[in-house]
Amino acid sequence: MASKFINITLKIWRQKNGTTKGALETYGLNNVSTDSSFLEMLDQLNEQLINERKSPVAFDHDCREGICGMCSLYINGRAHGPDTGVTTCQLHMRTFKDGETIYVEPWRSRAFPVIKDLVVDRSAFDRIQQAGGFVSVNTSGRTIDANATPIPKADADKAFEAAACIGCGACVASCKNGSAMLFVGAKVSQYALLPQGKVEAQQRVLNMVRQMDEEGFGNCTNTGACEVECPKGISIENIARMNREYLKAIVTED
Ligand code: FES
């Protein structure tokens, strides 16, 4: 398909830092290739702003290929924009029409405070992960052959699906309660389903859920918005599994 060029208007959230008030500012941007990604379009805007001696828009990104989960933007009122199953860096400008006005905002959640413009602090996810999202391995001695631990195919597939979570935070941003249960559910599930994860299962789920609550995330009321907006298609089945794991752990806790 031949590339086209479109002219757009951007309404972008600008905020100096976490303590100042922010507001939407309007920018016109012409000759945007429909082949460019959303982040490349923002690069083009920043070049324009720098040439006009204005401050460029701060936004997060790293891999630009849907892996790292950094490019977390709210576009036209949806996490990662209007396409499904993609992150902001995988969203292309061909999704938008010539003359369209596009609203770009940061994730909005109490647990993800704005650092600057479109950049939010998602370190709450890191602390939840540090609380239990790992498997301890004794590295002294011989490595056990992976094939010596048989795992049913259905469990391996489900664990793999849960492990696809990139921790972008779209689940939190799209939830009216600001709940992180899809993220934590995925992280608990990927280990709960495998024999390697069973050893620390009880402490893992207790620690991760406690950390999640401490960080100020809301509770899940089963609206399912998180599942719809997750770029990796993580199922809310993982929340149910986390709740079962939590219940099991809390009744047997010393
Ligand atoms: S920049 Fe890494 S997922 Fe988008």
Image (cartoon, rainbow, N blue to C red):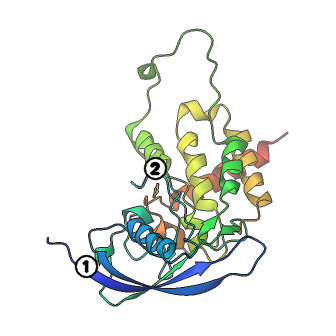
Left or right, 213 with respect to 159, comes to right
Residue 171 against residue 128 in the figure, above or below: below
Q: Which mark is residue 89?
A: none
Residue 160 against residue 21 in the figure, above or below: above
What residue sits 53% from the left and 44% below the top?
190
What residue sits 40% from the left and 77% below the top?
82
Left or right, 181 with respect to 142, comes to right
Q: Amino acid at mark 2?
A: Ala
Mark with earlier residue (2, 1): 1
Residue that extends furthest to the left in the rendered view of this protein? 1
Residue position for label 2: 164
Could you tell me which secondary element the residue under label 1 belongs to?
Answer: strand
**Residue 18 versus residue 122: which sits nearer the camera?**
18
Query: Which quarter of the figure is the C terminus placed in?
Result: top right
Question: Percent position (x, y) of residue 39?
Answer: 42, 66
Mark 2 or 1: in front is 1
Query: Which quarter of the figure is the N terminus placed in?
Result: bottom left
Question: Percent position (x, y) of residue 184?
Answer: 62, 54
Instruction: Mark yes or no: residue 201 visible.
Output: yes
- Few, some or many residues within 10 Å of mark 1 (<14, 14–19, 20+): some
Could you tell me which secondary element the residue under label 2 belongs to?
Answer: loop
Question: Percent position (x, y) of residue 106?
Answer: 59, 73
**Residue 241 versus residue 136: which sits nearer the camera?**
136
Q: Amino acid at mark 1?
A: Phe
Instruction: For ligand 1, tell me if the residue under mark 1 lies within 8 Å.
Output: no
Residue 172 against residue 240 in the figure, above or below: below
- Few, some or many residues within 10 Å of mark 2 (<14, 14–19, 20+): some
Residue position for label 1: 5
